[in-house]
Image (cartoon, rainbow, N blue to C red):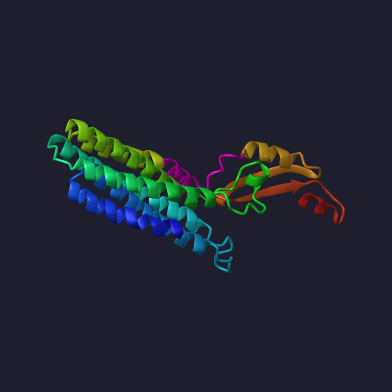
Amino acid sequence: ESALVRDRCPVLAEVAGGLYTGSLALLSDAAHVFMDVFALALSYLALRLSALPPDDRHTFGYHRLEVLAALVNGITLGAIAIEIFSEAWRRWQNPAPVKSLEMLAIAVIGLVVNLVVIFVLGEHGHKHEPGHDPAAQHGHTAEDINVRSAYLHVLGDAISSVGVIAAAVVIWFTGWYWIDPLISAAIGVLIVVSSWRVLRQALHILVEGVPEHLSLEKIGLVMAQTPGVLDIHDLHIWSICSGHVALSAHVVPREMGLGEENCLLA
C-alpha cells in the first residue's frame, strides 16, 4: 500500500515532464510507471481477497486471485509495449526536438523514487507463510507470484529511468534526437522481457501444471515404496497459487488388518 502511494508522484511528474520536454522516452517511462501503479493496486486487492477463508463453494479459498492478478499485469504490460513500439517507430522516422536538461532532472527524480519502492517490495516478497507447503520442504521459499509481478514492474521501471537519463545526457551533448525513440523502444523490450517470467508462471499455474521444483516421477516412486502400498494410480500434482501445492492420487494398498491402513496416512 505504501509503495502504491509512492508511485503516484512519478506518474504525474513524468507525464507532465514528457509533454513539456517532448520526450517519448520519458512518456514511455511514465506509461510504465502508470502500469506499476495499476499492478500495485491490483496486487493489493488480490492479496486482501486471497486472505479470505475457504467456504462451501470455494473449498481451496481464494488464492487463485493472486495468479489472475499477475496474469492481468502481464497482459497489460504487453499492450503498453506494443503502443510504445508503434510510437517509437513514428518518432524514429521523424525525430522531434527534446528539452534534454529538464528531461534529465525528471528522470533522476523518478529513479530515486523507484529505488525506494524496489526496496519496499523486496522486503515484502519473502514474507509468505510457508505452512505445510511441499515447496518449503524442498528448500524453496514460497514467494507470492503477485508480489513478484509488482516487484518486476518497478524494477523494470527503475532500469527504464536509467535509460532515460542516459538518453538525456547524450541528447544534451550531441543533439541526437533519434536517441529518444531508440531508448523508448529499448524500454518496450524491457517491459516485455521483465513481464514474461511472471506471465509464464501464472499461465503454468492456471493450466494446473506440475510445479517446476517438483518431480512427478520421483514423488510417485517414493509413494509407491511406502510400506503397505502395492501401486499408485492417477497421481496429480498442481498449484493452487505460487505458495500452495495440491496432490491427489489413487493408492492401492496391500491387504491389511483392521486399523493397519492408518499407517499409510502418516
The quadrant of the image that shows the N terminus is bottom left
Quarter holding residue 158: top left
x and y percent of residue 81 in the render? Answer: 29, 44
User: Horizontal placement of 99 versus 125: left or right?
Assistant: left
- Tell how many labels: 0
Front one among 185 and 79: 185
Give coordinates of residue 209: x percent, y percent. 53, 44
Does 176 appear above or below 265? above
What kind of secondary structure does the magenta stretch mostly adopt?
Answer: helix
Query: Which residue is pictured at 22% across the width and 38% down the height?
Result: 180
| Residue reaching furthest to the bottom | 56
Please name whichever residue, 229 or 152, is drawn nearer the observer in this view of the structure. Answer: 152
Single out the residue that lies furthest toward the top: 174
Task: Return the residue found at the far left.
Answer: 94
Res. 71 in view: yes
Q: Nearer the viewer, residue 74 or 143?
A: 143
Give the side of residue 12 with respect to residue 5, left or right: left
Residue 83 visible in the snapshot: no
Q: Residue at x 25, y 38 (%)?
A: 168
Residue visible at 67% across and 36% down? 218
> Is 179 within the magenta?
no
Which region shows up in magenta? 195-214
**Residue 78, x across and y down, in percent:** 33, 45
Residues 98 and 203: in front is 98
Quadrant assignment, res 172: top left
* 230 displayed left or right of 38: right
Residue for point 21% across, 32% down: 173
Magenta stretch encompasses residue 202: yes
